[in-house]
Image: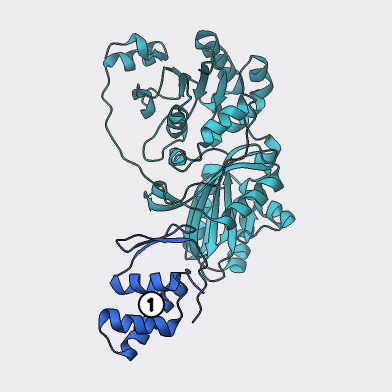
Chain colours: A cyan, B blue
Amino acid sequence: MNESVHVAVTGLHAADNPAPGIGIIRSLRHDPDWNGKIIGLAYDVYDTGVYDHNLLDYTFLIPYPNQGSEQVFERIMYIHEQVRIDVLIPTLDSELSIYQKLSPRIREAGIKMYLPSEEMVKARQKANLVAFCEKHDIPTPKTIAINNPGKLDDALDEMGFPLYVKGVFYDAKLCRTKDDALKAFDGFRKQWGLPVLVQESLSGEEFDICAVAHDGELLGALPIRKVRLTDKGKAWAAISLKNKELEMLTSKILNGLKWTGPCELEIMQDSKTKKLYLLEINPRFPAWIYLGTGANQNLPKLVLDLALGKDVSPLPPAKSGVTFVRHATDLVCPLEYIENLIVKGELYYDQIDR
Amino acid sequence: MGVTFTTEVTLSESGFLFDHSTGLTYTLNKTGQFIFKKLREEIEAPAIAEALQEEFDVDGSKARKDLDDFFRQLKDMGIVE
């Protein structure tokens, strides 16, 4: 029997824009050798995953990242004192920089994480991706970063329609006219600030790959094709693939970044030329990661082992043709769940009668 | 007509065809399944057309046309070249 490991996971809200935490926890628990406790770190009393007692042993509310790193650190230390955290897995883009910053202090407290460095994350940011791709000879759609609104017209003329207008951190809108583009530009500028990106629109098949690498070495990869999307563009059904070209490109990209940690790559195959283009790299697990347990790619388990400093070997290629379909369900729970979270900010599931 | 399969595909008994590299799925009718299996066995086009005539009781021109049409579709699907 393995020694019991206590893993804290964020990103527990799985509604119309599901966070990855639930898929990560289910993957960890899926491992036949799993022996440990899961500590849910929630931002809100109504984060949906909190109400699934089969997933979590404890839940603690934590401050939002914008409340500052000191607040987050103090809360993590409090939780560590109460229930011990061996490994912490932050799962959201918005958390990454704060945990990178806190990493030395968290490590000193005896908590392990397995994250990409700030430099790696910066290199794959939307505004820097073109430069990275040029340097490493990786095809990517033509992109212009607009730092000055006065330059937008020239960029639109140069790119031609249709094109994508993209926020510097999140969101993208396909624009077919100048009016569409101006509206999207203003929206993204207000929401995320400058630069706003103007990107050529390619037509073809889109693939996603979740991968884990250590210092640029690819250790596991799960390529998928999304077969059903929500109106927010989130995967609601997908199928795993066996695709050597996608895996080779993934390996080249992560090697170029010297990537360490999990990530999700979005890749487009041009319908005419069949050439593969890198669209984006998200520095975290995707919400659909539980699919990997059926495709011999339990990547959260791999990350847990890496965080614990275990020797790991690269996983064999993913099994293709494995499908997931997301299914919304209702969780019924006692009032004490809500009471404990509101009053104490914490919930010990085994202390509540169900 | 020598064909080269450009991708890994699986055809099940029901006629369900899965392309492992793209995740695309197709359904083949009985004629499509028959031709596909012959292509997999690396049988040349004239022999497949003859086999089609025998199996489905059609004349030579109909068999060749069906074979050409099906081959074109497989090419469009990126499965053969």
Q: Is residue A286 left or right of residue A350?
A: right
In the rendered image, residue A202, in percent from the top left (x then y), is placed at 53, 64
Of all residues, the one furthest to the right in this rendering is A135
Looking at the picture, does residue A188 appear above or below residue A81? Answer: below
Q: Amino acid at mark 1?
A: Phe
- The residue that appears at 49% across and 27% down in the rendered structure is A10
How many numbered circles does the render carry? 1
At mark 1, the secondary structure is helix
- The residue that appears at 62% across and 61% down in the rendered structure is A142
In the rendered image, residue A244, in percent from the top left (x then y), is placed at 57, 56
Q: Quadrant of the C terminus of chain A?
A: top left
Q: Quadrant of residue A216?
A: top right
Q: Nearer the viewer, residue B57 or A136?
A: B57
Q: Quadrant of residue A122?
A: top right
Q: Is residue A95 left or right of residue A251?
A: left
Q: Which residue is mark 1?
A: B70
Q: Quadrant of residue A75?
A: top right
Q: Nearer the viewer, residue A107 or B51?
A: B51
How many other residues sit within 10 Å of disc 1, few (<14), some (14-19) or many (≥20)? some
Q: Can residue A113 be seen by looking at this rendering?
A: no
Q: Is residue A7 left or right of residue A291?
A: right
In the rendered image, residue A257, in percent from the top left (x then y), is placed at 69, 45
